[in-house]
Structure formats: structure tokens, C-alpha cells
Image (cartoon, rainbow, N blue to C red):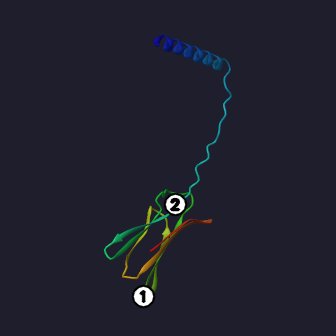
Amino acid sequence: MSRLLLIAGLLGATVACAAANEMAAEPAPTHYVMAAAAPFEPACDIEVTRIDGGVRLEALAPEFRASPEPLEYRFTVTKRDRAGSSDIVQGGEVVEPLLGSVDLSLDRGAGYRARLTLRDGDGQVCATEVRS
């Protein structure tokens, strides 16, 4: 068995040497390909965490990195209860992954709707929503 492996190894080395000599005789043409930069596609998320008597809603851009064009966010939280509804609105330029945070107290029968949108100069690039 070891003799067979030795012969196979010698054959492989011979073929590799022949190929290398052939390639050295004629240099291969050089081609340059310009790699395109990966497009920036921001992601957005709303993380919901239970807290004593309610929830914490955090607006996130988890893959945030500086973009060639400024990104703006709008985080709108609407709370509904027996008395009616109220809105909390946060917004501004995206400068870090945590965009905003809202703590809501939720009595029995109360609910919420939270919506996060990211926009660049061309329009909306990401949107997400959570509801209770």
C-alpha cells in the first residue's frame, strides 16, 4: 500500500512540475477587475423588554456604520388605554445603533403600537413595527 502511495505522490509531483514549466513559458494575461463596494443597506429593529408594570421599547439600527449619506430616523410609539391614545415621537440623525428608548406603563387593557423608519435623501430605506 505504501508503495502505491509513493508512486501516486511522484506522479502528482511530476504533473505539477510540468504544469509549472508550461505556465512559466507563456505568462498568463493580467486582468484587473474593480471590486464594487457593497451597497449600504441599513437594518432597523424595535426591541421589546418587559419592565415592572410595562415595557421598554428600544429603536435600533443594529448594523449601523457611517453611511455616505446621512440617515434620519423617526420612532413613533402610540399608547392606547381606556382614556384614549397618546403618541410619543422621537427622531433625528442616526449617529449610533441605539436610536431611542421609551418606557411605557401598561395598565390592564392598555396596548401600544411602535413604528420605526429610517430615511436617506432618496426616501424610506427601512421600516419596522411592533404591537401589543
Q: Does residue 130 sit above or below 64 in this rendering?
A: below
Instruction: Name the spot of residue 42 as percent of width and height, x first.
Output: 53, 59
Q: CA distance from mark 1 to mark 2?
A: 35 Å
| Residue 26 shows in this picture | yes
Amino acid at circle 2: Ala
- The structure residue drawn at horizontal position 64% and vertical position 20%, both measured from the top left corner, is 23
Image quadrant assignment for residue 13: top right
Amino acid at circle 1: Arg
Instruction: Name the spot of residue 17 as percent of width and height, x first.
Output: 58, 15
Q: Quadrant of the C terminus?
A: bottom left
Instruction: Name the spot of residue 111 as percent of width and height, x first.
Output: 43, 79
Furthest residue in direction top, as rendered: 3
Residue labelled with disc 2? 43
| Residue 89 shows in this picture | no
69 or 15, which is in the foreground?
Answer: 15
Q: Does residue 88 sit above or below 36 in this rendering?
A: below
User: Residue 82: which disc?
Assistant: 1
